[in-house]
Image (cartoon, rainbow, N blue to C red):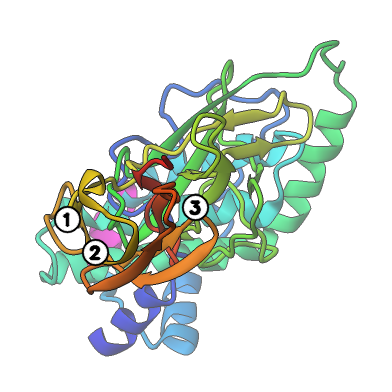
Amino acid sequence: MKTILFLLLLASPALHADSPREVFPSDYKPHPCASAELCGGFTRTEIMRYAAQFRGFNLDPRWLRSHWSQLEATFKPLCDKIATCFATPGNSEAFCTDILRPAFEESANRYPRQSYDWDQWIMTAVSYYVIELAHFPAKYREAQACAAELPVAGEPRKLETWIHPRDFGPGYNGLITIHAIDAETRVPVMGKVSFEGQRVFPIESPDGTAMTAFELKWPVVLNRVRNQTTGHEDLIVPPVTIQAVGYEPVTIQLPVEIATLEVSMSPEASQLKPGMNTITVTARDTTTGAPAEMRVMADDVVLGDTHHPLTIEIPASGKRPEIWITSLFDRYSDVVVAPAK
């Protein structure tokens, strides 16, 4: 039984794990078209039958009877949130149900994990949630139809957005989630998430596109932009735009710190003489101190890689080419080692 439950939880949508903020704030403003009785259409017996036949769960009827009032009191606010989400124009049924599913499961954490009460509660929560899905489509259509008849605001509404985790360094290799809620009603809004200059694939979302409230895999490739001072290229974090029906688009900057380098050359540029010279360019990450693999250039000629002896020819005139380095893997911005002379 526990093996089946564990596999079920692994298969759940990967949403907002350990988010420091509520994905669906409790101080939201209920929608006038939200159904007051979205859930509660099934009896304990029906839930027990479903749990056994389709999930392999062994619910204890005595435990269920003694905890039923507590379960209903816990699930009712979650169903009310789904109802308001259903009535919010632009939100899909799948979006609303997916973002609230973890809350049903997490409600079991009032008990120690893997305890008997925890097992019974989470099996009931999953069964309750899934069986209620059966009549959600009709409720969703009703809520959307009701909302469509209401007066439409003359100006686009505003979004409030945030990112989880709140900051991460250049070496971060994990998941990020971009959240958006209506700035006035504080109801989650389904928005399309786009990264400038690239395509990002979500871990899981209702339609397979990157959207708010669903995890995205980081790292995202950094964009290159021309540095007007040096003439070379800097790496920047791609701006992210959130677009939702009826809302002003929002562009945000991800809280990513781009790695920088400490660079030196031996011998120094002033010591180079006309003719053939051997140089070694060293580059180290200023945060980790680790050597950075960079391509060493003389103007537009490739000399080789950092941390290796390289040969450079200085003409008889003593006119020295610009020596600079670039990252082949887009981890660091270009760096001028020695300007042309």
Q: How many neighbours does mark 3 have within 10 angstroms: few (below 14), some (14-19), or many (20 or more)?
A: many
User: In the image, 323: left or right of 214?
Assistant: left
Q: Secondary structure at mark 1?
A: loop
**Residue type, mark 2 in image:** Ile
Q: Secondary structure at mark 3?
A: loop
Q: Residue at x 71, y 50 (%)?
A: 92
Between marks 3 and 1 in the image, the one whose residue lies nearer the viewer: 1
Q: Residue at x 53, y 31 (%)?
A: 252
| Residue 248 vs residue 296, the one in the foreground | 296
Q: How many neighbours does mark 2 have within 10 angstroms: few (below 14), some (14-19), or many (20 or more)?
A: many
Q: How many neighbours does mark 1 have within 10 angstroms: few (below 14), some (14-19), or many (20 or more)?
A: few
Q: Tag 2 or tag 3, which sits nearer the N-term?
A: 3
Q: Are marks 3 and 1 in contact (CB under 8 Å)?
A: no
- Image vertical order of residue 340 relative to residue 31, above or below: below
> Is residue 286 one of those drawn in magenta?
no
Q: Which residue is mark 2?
A: 279
Tell me the quadrant of the picture where the N terminus can be found: bottom left
Q: Which residues are magenta?
A: 63-70
Provide the major secondary structure of the magenta segment. Answer: helix
Q: Tag 1 or tag 2, which sits nearer the N-term?
A: 1
Q: Secondary structure at mark 2?
A: strand
Q: Are marks 3 and 2 in contact (CB under 8 Å)?
A: no
Q: Position of residue 28 (x, y in %)?
A: 50, 24
User: Could you say which disc has been placed on residue 267 in the image?
Assistant: 1
As drawn, the residue found furthest toward the front would be 316
Q: Position of residue 17 (x, y in %)?
A: 33, 54
* Quarter assignment of residue 98: bottom right
Task: For marks 3 and 1, give the CA distance.
Answer: 32 Å
Q: Which residue is mark 3?
A: 222
**Residue type, mark 3 in image:** Leu
